[in-house]
Amino acid sequence: MRQFDCPQCGAPVVFQSATAEAAVCAHCQSMVVRNDVNIEAIGQMALLPPDMSPLQIGAHGEIDGLAFTLLGRLRVRWSDGSWNEWFVEYADHTRGWVGEAQGYFMVLRESALTSPLSESPDDLKAEQLVEINGTAYRITDSKLVSCLGGEGELPSAVTTGEQWQSIDLQRSDGYVATLEWNQGVWRFFEGKNASFIELKWQNLRALPGWDGVPLETQRNQTGALNCPSCGGVVNLRAAGFTMTAVCSHCGNLLDTTTPKLKVVQAAAEARTVKPAIPLGQRGMIDGVEWEHIGFQYRRDPWSGWMEYLLFNPCRGFRWLTEFKGHWTLIDRLLSPPDVNDREVNHRGRRYRMFADETCEVRYVEGEFYWQVRRGEKARITDYIAPPFILSREVYPKLNETSWSAGESIEPAALQKAFGLPSIKGPMPGTVGIVQPNPWTSRWRDLKPLALTLGTLLLALQLISSRHSAPGQNYRDRIVFDRATAATTPIVTKPFQIKQQGGVNITADAPVDNSWLGFDLELIEQTTGTRYSAPLMVQYYHGYDDGNWSEGSQSATATIPGVPPGTYTIALDAEADPRITTMPFSISVKSGQTYWSNFFIGALALLAYPLYTGIRNFSFEASRWKDSDYSPYPKASTDDD
């Protein structure tokens, strides 16, 4: 550590790092540059407004087992927002940067460019692929940025208002990088994204209003400002993170990126929607306290939905979305997933494209981490694997693409989390885009059981059929005679049935536009047990606008469950009045296997699994019915 006197005010300026070349005087904000012999002041940094970042100079973190310390900070601004860039020194005496935005962190170190870039900064757009040092990167956003101010030690002198082009990049393996174009020179930084928990922060500053720190003891740290339009007090709940706020007094949309607020959009005519969760309401989700700080209503060409912005100074931001009473909890996705046409593979889960539409902001209230405006448009593509969702938002005017991941959450859980008397639930008859399907788990469990039981039942039926192949037991030719039919029944000769099972009795007669019928009895000779069945042979044909026919010259009666024994058949015959005599044949086959028993058994055994599968299918078909990418067949509609 070395200490110098500020050339501007004489106050001590301490350099903790041997690698830092500049520092901001904490007393007069002068940029002090050293070369270890001569100290000079080259300009003055703007005083940074209070913010709600938990980081401070002297805080410690760790990345991949390597500790680092925060030595200084730059506040970087672009047209629609700003963020912190912290200069860090690692335990191995190397240095780098930690970008802090929206509660997430980009940890970077500078790398040399092994070959010059052929593209100019203006040619590099979001979603474009670019090769750097032999590795392919996808551009996630490109912005012209400027320095708002700074504090502490810095690797080189930066002046307030200095501008450069900042281009964020992503590799296919999830690692990130940043290109900077400043005064005709490219600089390249490589690293990774990380969450607050992953960086194992220590020596953080106390935050007013959070973690038991009283708000009233640090009023000058709360971010209270005055609206330039009406003079009303604007209390920023996420000062330093908030880029836009709506004045609660006059409704004007304000730019909060500089210490002096300015109006960026006049107030809406009237509130068009009302949030279900009041602004400022806090709730516990997943063991973390969140405050509702921003609310917006968005629409695509077909429908509208509400979005609630939640804030925690250490965890950043989360979103709650609500559509027809169906709620989803959304987090930013640090690494974009692998997109393959209409499918996305992410963390072992396959997502299908559900919607791809341009949406527009219709109403805003509260504060946001970017300069949201009514009328702002974005292209949103949703991929779902209920109860999970992935969303890609492309902002053409901002030259930016972002990904988020969400999961369905029950209204009752939100009601309990935020301590609300009630909260809107699903509209009757609607299925949410990622609403959990109550039948999926049951169908998933029952489907293999149903397949196993069905296979076993079929196997038993086939085995039974094989071992009970039908045999010819009896066949005879008989003549029907009307003169004796009324008084004397026809009785066949005795025959044997050797195995228990079904018996088919078939009659064949040369009827022609006539009929021959029987009331038959199958009679067991020892016990006298009788099995009755009707049998009718009838056949008709003719011509009426074409040839037609119905019936047959053969008919069969089936008698199930007949035991072995000696049998005869008694036939009480009747015939068409035009028939006086007619020869006919009678045949008997036993050992029949009837599939009706199989189907009755299968229906009884598989009724509930099939019901569950049908309900599961119906639920998913209802979910996808309004999607242009539905995997389920759609019912045809008549536009006339």
Image (cartoon, rainbow, N blue to C red):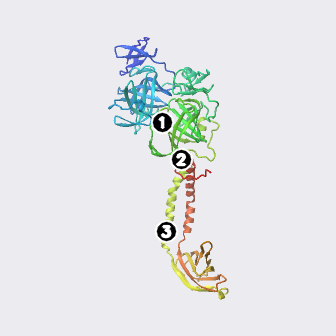
Query: x, y percentage for residue 123?
Result: 41, 32
- Contact flag, marks 3 and 1 (Cβ < 8 Å): no
* Amino acid of disc 3: Leu
What is the spatial separation of the Cα atoms under label 2 and label 3, in whole angstroms? 45 Å
Residue holding disc 2: 628
The first of marks 3 and 1 along the sequence is 1
**Vertical relation: 370 (above or below) 40:** below
On residue 402, the disc is 1
In which quadrant of the rendered view does residue 554 lie? bottom right
Name the residue located 57 percent from the left edge and 65 percent from the top edge: 600
Counting from the top left corner in percent of width and height, residue 158 is at 41, 20
* 510 and 436: which is toward the camera: 510
Pick the quarter of the image with the N terminus. Answer: top left
Closer to the chain start, of discs 1 and 2, is 1
Kindly tell me whether residue 90 is visible in this rendering.
Answer: no
Q: In this view, does 12 lie above or below 93?
A: above
Position of residue 575 relative to residue 122, above or below, is: below
Q: In this view, does 534 lie to the left or right of 67?
A: right
The crowding category of the residue bearing disc 2, from other C-alpha atoms within 10 Å (few below 14, some 14 to 19, many at least 20), is: few
State the residue position of label 3: 462
Q: Is mark 2 on a helix, strand or loop?
A: loop
The residue that appears at 54% across and 66% down in the rendered structure is 598
The picture places residue 180, in percent across and down from the top left corner, at 40, 28
Would you say residue 442 is visible in this rendering? Answer: yes
Q: Residue at x 37, y 16 (%)?
A: 34
Asked if disc 1 and disc 2 are in contact, CB closer than 8 Å, the reply is no
